[in-house]
Amino acid sequence: MRISSLWVERFGRFEGFGLALGDGLNVVYGPNGSGKTTLHRFLEGMLLGFCGGDGLPLPRYRTYLPGGGGGELTLRLDGLDRPIRRRVDPLEPSGEASVVPEALSSLIPSRERFLLVHSVDQDSLASPELIPRLLELAGGLDLRPLGLDVFSLRLEVERRDLELEVLERALLDRIEETEGRIALLSRAREELRSLEEELEGLDAQLELSVEELGKSGRADLVRLALEVGEELSALALAERGLRARALELGFDPGRDRASAERALDLAKRSSLALPLRDLLSRVKAELSYLASEHEGLKELRVRLGSALEEGARLEALVEGLSGAFPEALGAQVSSLESAWRSLEGKLLGRGKLEGLSSAKRAFEGVVEGMREGLKKEELLLEASVRGRRWLFLALLGGGLSALGVYLTNPLLLGGAAVAVALGLWSWFSSLSQEKASLKGRRAMLFDLERVLEALRGLEEEMARLSEEVYGGSPDPEGSLDLLLALAGRRLREEAEGRLSKLRSSWEVALGGRSFGELRLELARRGGELSGSIEGLKFAASELEGISAGLPPDGSEGLSPSGLEECEGVLGDLLWAMARREQLKKTLSLVGLGREDFRSFRSPKGQFRAREGLLELLRRREEVLLRMGELSRMAFALDPAREALEELKADLFLLRRERAKLKTASLLLEEGLRRFDDLRSSKALDLASEVLSRLSGGLYRRIRPLRAGRRSLGVEDSEGRWWEVEGLSRGFVEQLHLSLRVALCREDGLPLLVDDALSGLDGERALSALEVLSGMPFQTILFTSRWELAEVAFSMGARAFRLGG
Amino acid sequence: MLIEKAFFSLEVRSVASSWLRKMGFSCLPQEFDERWSAHPFVALLQGIAEELSAREVGPFEGLPWDGEVPREALRFLLHLMSDRGGEPG
């Protein structure tokens, strides 16, 4: 498709302006402000439409269409001229009236693509950010639309390869280690072979020695000794292994049977250590629990006793209070109170108080009278005492006179003495009676005074209570009753409350039983607990006794399987020891004792032969022991070799897996490269060609740097790749132009270039004109550079001048 | 001690195999999604794998090589693609 002609009816500064355009390159020259951009926008709008969906001119055309405008293009389509007419009218609901050929919509798939590819100005050529979009249009080099994230696939492959590499290193280490061990075991096997040869030699020498000794008729015994010696060697070897194993298990069997038996005993007890300690700890825990329960029971019984006592006391109190202060009295308190408040009650009360006061006063009179009577009696008594003192003196004088008389008449004196004695007795007797009487009266007076004191206090108290209760209307008798009734009722209520609380709190504990039943049960339970505690204490002491002989607390003891093995090892060891002792005994019995050689013809020679024989036997035993050790090592050689083979097989497998992973990585790498090549369309190839021409051969190829990424690279003439981001603005313009030229060639639509080659130097600009003039699509180049127009014209392009 | 060391080799003999099983392809789906075979990119990989299979000497020094390695590598990639649960585009 190309634009044959344009006619501007009205658009911007143009009105009634027309041009007839050529097939290839058309250059519209004009100085700044001559209307190049206006014509560029006019062509865009005529091809794509001026208005948006809202019926208003799009912003990029709005300034050119004040009050409307429009024009006509003639398109050359399939060899025919097709007109496009558009008229923007503000009164038109859709914004513009247009006549557009149907084929145009299929030729121009989208406004965005047309503007990006076919409508170029200076700014869009210098924008690196547009390159990825152009790149997609030119080749679609992103694999993501294919549902494949190659980048993460490669990461996964590399991760697995790295893991296998680590494993490979570990395997190589183990292979090296195993090879070292195999070398060691091989040496052991060689030594074993040489020992076998030595053993053969020893056996041959022994045979000779036996033969020699056989001449003395002792060959049978020597053979027996040899057999015994062999068995002894085997036993010693076995013992060594068993002893080592027993030591590994933690039980030193020692060198004699007693030690081994002790070790076996220790092992058995050790196997008991764990369950015994466990049992002991459980017994102790149970004991502790039972003791605490027993204590609790005791406390319960005490509490039960005190509760019973308190209950009984409270019951008695309630009962007593109920009897002493019947309910009726409490209920009548209010009526009594009102009655006492009455005048009659007050008078009665006052009368009682007055009676009490008069009684007190009368009592006071009595007391006073008694006090005065006592005082008089005391005075009389004092006078009497004085009189009697004088009488005493008189009697004494009489006595003395009588003494004089005595000297003259003893009989008379005796009568006088009796009379005096009687008089004195009578006097003292009456005096003491009078004193006692006086003392008793004094005590009575004291008591009466106390009573009087109490009466006074009672009077005061009654007056106070009367004052408190009746507000100055004394009713001591009634107030006392009332107070007592109130106090009694409160006391009883309180006692009943406590009793009820006590009963309810024990109701749960009793569980339907009586206190007596509960007491019995507690006693029975206490007895049981005591029995259990005693039993457990006995068991604990027994267990502690047993545990005392066990290994220390820190050791774990033997498990059942450990004990089984230990018993087997130590049992075998004991058997071997016993057997060895038996054999030694046998050997000593059949041994070549000194007395056995007495019959030899040459005792000295026979003795040497015997010594040599014994030396051979000792060496043979050593050889057998060493061979036993080496045999085990030699036995380990073949498994080690097998292990090495397997490790090597594993290594081969692992390396093959790594080869697989690396090949997978290679496949992805190479696949992406080829995929890029396949996906790089003709457009990209053409863009590469254009770029090569524009850059004068400096760059020759455009490709994405990495598939899966929207990044572009260019290959220079020496095969090096450069990222676009790092290149100059002039080069970016060349790249833009190259991609657009290629895409325009694919689309077959015109290219509108508005002042876009101004950033290129003369040589590049010339190259660009050459490229554009050689393209099969139409190019309309707007420029302010006259020389470009001239050059284009000289290349056969159509050139137009705007303004002047 | 010597004997124990010698026996040590026996213990490690199957370690590598089990590691391979653990890390290798057994954790991938047994069957891959056949639709991936028809993917244009996979078809391209298949061609490259066949080219590599024809090589007598592998491209990686020190690693074993036979004609099956590239095919197995391609199968592994198909397993990976299937394992990721994506739909072929």
Image (tube, coloured by chain):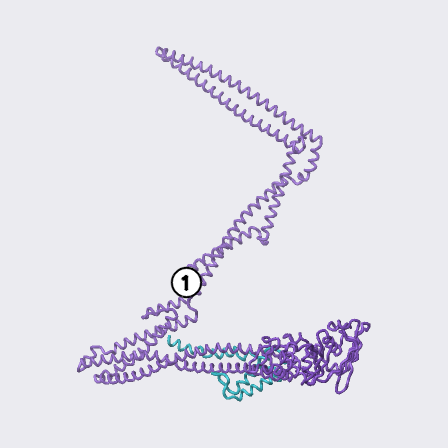
Q: Is residue B10 at least partly visible in the picture? A: no
Which residue is rendered at x = 49% and y = 82% of the image? Answer: A655
Measured as percent of width and height from the top left, residue A608 is found at 20, 80
Measured as percent of width and height from the top left, residue A739 is found at 65, 80
- Residue A632 versus residue A369: which sits nearer the camera? A632
Which residue is rendered at x = 21% and y = 83% of the image? Answer: A216
| Quarter location, residue A767 | bottom right
Of the 4 image quadrants, the one containing the C terminus of chain A is bottom right
Which residue is rendered at x = 68% and y = 38% of the image? Answer: A332
Chain under label 1? A
Q: Which amino acid type is marked by label 1? A: Asp
Q: Residues within 10 Å of mark 1 (few under 14, many from 20)?
A: few
The furthest residue to the right: A91
From the rendered image, report the letter of the chain displayed in purple.
A
Of the 4 image quadrants, the one containing the N terminus of chain A is bottom right
- Residue A653 versus residue A484: which sits nearer the camera? A653
Up-down relation of residue A773 to residue A521 (above or below): below
From the rendered image, report the letter of the chain displayed in cyan.
B
Residue beneath label 1, please? Answer: A553
Q: Is residue B44 at least partly visible in the picture? A: yes
Numbered marks: total: 1
- Residue B48 versus residue A755: which sits nearer the camera? A755
| Quarter location, residue A11 | bottom right
Which residue is rendered at x = 49% and y = 23% of the image? Answer: A436
